[in-house]
Amino acid sequence: MQPTSHAFVENAHRALNDAQLHAALGHMKAGFQDKRAATIARMPEFEDLRDQGRAIKNHTLAHLDAYLERFEAKVTETGGRVHWAPTPAEARDAILKICQAAGARTVTKGKSMIAEEIALNEHLAANGIEPIETDLGEYIIQLRGELPSHIIAPAIHLVKEQVAESFYAHHTELDPKRPLDDARALTDEARAMLRQRFLAADVGITGANFLIAETGSTVIVTNEGNGDLTQNLPRIHIVIASIEKVVPTLEDSATILRLLARSATGQEYSAYTTFSTGPKRPGDLDGPDEFHVVILDNGRSALLGTPAQETLRCIRCGACMNHCPIYASVGGHAYGWVIPGPIGAAINPGLIGLEEAGHLPNASTFCGRCESVCPMRIPLPSIMRHWRERQHERKLSPGTVRAGLGLWAWAARRPRLYRFGTRLAAALLGRLGRRRGRLKRLPLAGGWTDWRDLPAPEGRTFQQHWAARRSGAGR
Amino acid sequence: MVSGPGSMSGTSSSEARDAPRIGLFVTCLVDFFRPSVGFAAVRLLEQAGCAVEVPAAQTCCGQPAYNSGDRADSKAIARDVIAAFEGFDYVVAPSGSCAGMLSHHYPELFADEPEWERRARDLARRSFELVAFLVDVRGMQAVADAAYAGRVTYHDGCSGLRELKVKRQPRALLSSVAGLELTELPGAEVCCGFGGTFCVKYPEISNRMVEEKAADIVGTGADTLLAGDLGCLLNMAGKLKRQGAPVRVRHVAEVLAGMTDTPAIGDTPEP
C-alpha cells in the first residue's frame, strides 16, 4: 500500500476531530487492557514466559537463514512449495501465478497483515480475480474500501452503526427494513453472506502466526473459524508470511502461543489455533490439493544486526497499541501504513524508510507502557530513539529544531552563562505571570499556550536562592 | 552509622559528620519554574539525616537532546553532570524522569567508551528519585511533621513508575501526612501527554492526552493533584487552569515537607 506516514500530523488532526472514532477507541480499555490484566494476574509464570519467548526469538533471529532453509526443506518434504519473495512485487506475482494457474475467479482470505503490506487485494482485483476478506473486521473494511486500523482488530475504528450502514449499502439483496442494531445481527448477516463465498472460492489465502522449521507447519490463530474455512475448503491454500515468523520447533510455538492470546485479547487461547502441514495426503479426509508458502522479506533482513532487529521478535499481538495513549488518541489510520502504534513506529522506518515514516518514532512521549506490556520485551522506546538518532545524523529533522536544540545544548554546557540566562528569563516570565500565576499566551510558545496555560515561574531560580542562602544574604 | 529518620531532629556534630553527602540534582524545570520544590527536597533530605549540597555546575540532565536523537550533545552534557556529581554519596533528583536519565540512560550512552561508561555506572548506582530515596534508602516511614487538609489524588509519572518503580513510596509517605485523604486516580499510570518536547512537537495529540487526564482528575473529586515530576505537573496544571477546574496542583515533595504556603502551580497568588 502507499504510505501516508509523512502526513502524520494532518492524519492525526483529522482523527482527533472525528467524534465517531473517539467513541470507538474509547472501548479499548475495557476491551483489551482490563482483560489482559485479568488473565495475566492469573498466571504467575507470565514474566518467565516472556523471557522464554524473547530467548526463542533471539535464538531464531541469530540463525534465521538456517531455520528458514530447514522450514523450506520440510515444506517440500510434505508436498508443499515455498516461494521466496524479497519484495512485495515478487510476493504478489508469485500469488497471482498460482491463482492464474488454477484458473481462479474468487479467492477467500483469512486476516493477513502481510497481504496488506504487499497490497495483494488490489493486485488480484486488477488481474480479474476477486479477493474476499473473511475475517469479520476485514470483511467490514473491505466493503467500506478502508484499510485496517489495528493489527488484530482491523475495524476497531468503527462503531456498530457505521457497520450497519455499510451492510445496508452493500447487501442490497436483503430486506432493507431488517434490523441491524446489535453486534449479533451484524455477525449473523456477515456469516450468512460469507458462507457461499467460502464454498465457491478456488483459492484460500491465509497469513501465519508461526512457521515451524521442525515440521514445515504454518500456524494461524483466529476467533471466528474463518481461517479454517478459508484454508480447508478451496483446492489451493496459499500462506503468506514474512521471514521473522519462523520458530525452530512445535514446542517453541506452544510457548509463544501461551503469550500471544493473553497479550492480545486477554484470552488464554484464541478460539481456533490451526496447524497446517502440507497438502492433503492419500487417505486424508480433507485439506487442499496444493499448499504454497510465500515468504516475504521486504527490508526485514536489512534490520538484522541493527538496533531495530529487536522489532523482528514481534508476534503481532497488538498489546503495545492497545496500551498506547497516542494510538488511543489518533487511531491506527493516522500512522499511514500497515502497522500502527508503537511497533509501527519502531519497525516502519526500517521497512518504508525514515523519510516517509519519520514522524512515527517522534510521536511518542516515551512513556514506556508499550514496552511494559510487550510479551517479547521489545524495547520500543529505545528503538524509536534509535530512529531519532538516525534522523538527526541525516539532518532529516527540521533545521529550526536542530538549531534551537544546538543553541540550548551549547548553553547547557556553560553553567555560568546558563544561570545568567535562566535568571533573566525567570524574572521576565515571573513578572509577566505575577498577577495570575500563569500565562495565557506567550510568543513562540504557541505549541504550549494554544492548548493550556503556562504556569508562571516563581521569579527567581533555585540557583539564585541557593547562592543567596549560601552567602548568608537571604533565604 | 548515619542517623535514621527516627532521630532526624538532632543535628549534633557527630551526626552531621556521619550524614551521607547528597548532591541535589535540582532539575532544570524546578530551577526555572518552581524553586520551592527544590527547597522542599532539601528539607526532606535533611529530615532524613542527610547533608545536602547543590553543585553549581549543573544545568540539565540532557534529556531534550537525548530524546531528540542528538547523541553528541547528550554525551557532552552527561559528561558534565557525571563530573559535577562525582564524590557525593548519593545524587537525588525531585524527578523520576531526570533520575531515570542519570541511572538508566547515561550508562547506555557510553556503551562504546569504557572509561566514561564506568563513571556513568558509578553515578547511576548513586542516583535516586527523591521519594524513592527517602523510603528505600533512608528507611523513612513517615513524614516528620507535615499536615495537609485536603483530598488528594496522585499521578504516577511514567519514567519514575516504569524505569524506577516509584509507586508505593509516595503513597506510603502521603498516608502519614496529617489530614490528607488520598483518592486513587483512575488511569494514574497513563501518560499525561507531556513527554518533554513531544508536547510542543505534537501539541494537538498532547492536548487530547492531557484533556483525558484532566477529566480523570476532576472525576476523582479531589481538590489537590500531586505528582513527582514538574514536567507532568506543569502540563496537567496548565490544562486544569485553562479549563478553570478548581484543583490545586503541587509537587509531592511540597506536601511531604509541609511547605504548602506558596501558591500552587499556576494558581493566582493571594492578594
Image: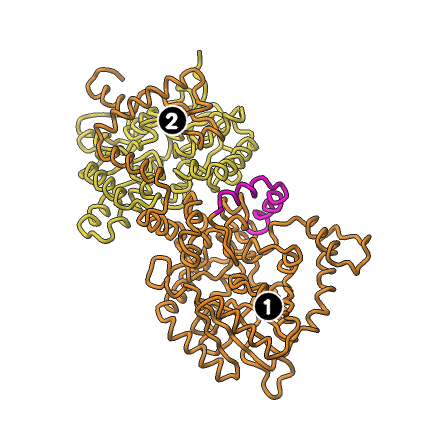
Q: Is residue B125 visible?
A: no
What's the residue at 38%, 71% (across, down)?
Answer: A64
The residue segment tinted magenta is A7-33
Chain letter matching colour orange: A
Q: Per the image, is A16 magenta?
A: yes
Which residue is drawn at the image coordinates 42% and 78% (left, top)?
Answer: A70
Mark 1 highlights which residue?
A124
Q: Quadrant of the C terminus of chain B?
A: top left
What amino acid is found at the position of numbered circle 2 in the picture?
Glu
Residue B212 lies, in percent from the top left, at 54, 37
CA distance for labels 2 and 1: 65 Å
- Element assignment for label 1: helix
**Residue B224 spot, x, y in % from top left:** 48, 27
Q: Residue B223 lies in magenta, yes or no? A: no
**Badge nearest the viewer, 2 or 1:** 1
**Crowd rating for badge 2 (residues with CA inside 10 Å; few <14, some 14–19, many 20+):** many
User: Residue B6's image quarter?
Assistant: top left
In the image, taking residue A113 as reference, residue B226 lies left or right, namely left
Vertical order, B39 against B98 (above or below):
above
Q: Mark 2 — residue?
A: B254
